[in-house]
Amino acid sequence: MEVKDFQNKIIEFISDWDKKRGVKQNKQSAFIHLIEEIGELAREYVNIESRKNRYSKKELENAIADVFMWVVKLANIHGIDIEKVVLKIIEEEQKLL
């Protein structure tokens, strides 16, 4: 699967999920969801270090995936093609290596 196809699949999934819940996402709500997911990821990092009995690898994996999906959703709202932008950054940075 190409990155663009993957990005579209994520957008389709989130759109279907939002329809089911009766939610219409905008820039602000998508950003808030992203921050919520980052908070869940942060909680798992705290659990790894300080509350080992509460740590869950599955929750860590889910939090990372959720952060990724909301980054994709936010990029889509702003009309950003993630593959294009990331490849451009890599190309520019490789010139500096």
Image (tube, rainbow, N blue to C red):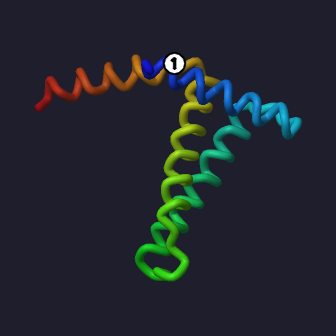
94 left or right of 23?
left
- For image coordinates 37% across by 26% down, the residue present is 86
In this image, 2 relative to 31: left or right? left
Name which quarter of the figure residue 27 lies in: top right
Indicate the position of residue 95 as horizontal and vertical percent values.
14, 23
Residue extending furthest right?
22
Work out which residue is located at the far left of the displayed protein and give it. Answer: 97
Tell me if 87 is positioned left or right of 64 in this view. Answer: left
Look at 51% across and 25% down and name the residue there: 6
Q: Seen in the image, is 7 located left or right of residue 86?
A: right
| Image height of 84 relative to 33, above or below | above
- When asked about the image quadrant of residue 13, the answer is top right
Residue drawn at (58%, 18%) of the image: 79
Using the image as rendered, state which of residue 96 and residue 21 is in the foreground.
21
Residue 19, horizontal then vertical, whole percent: 83, 31
Q: How many marks?
A: 1
* Quarter of the image that includes the N terminus: top left
Q: Please say if 33 is above or below 11.
A: below
> Residue at horizontal 32%, vertical 19%?
88
Question: What's under tag 1, amino acid-wise?
Answer: Asp
What residue is disc 1 on? 5
Quadrant where the C terminus lies?
top left
**In the structure shown, which secondary structural element does the residue marked by tag 1 occupy?**
helix
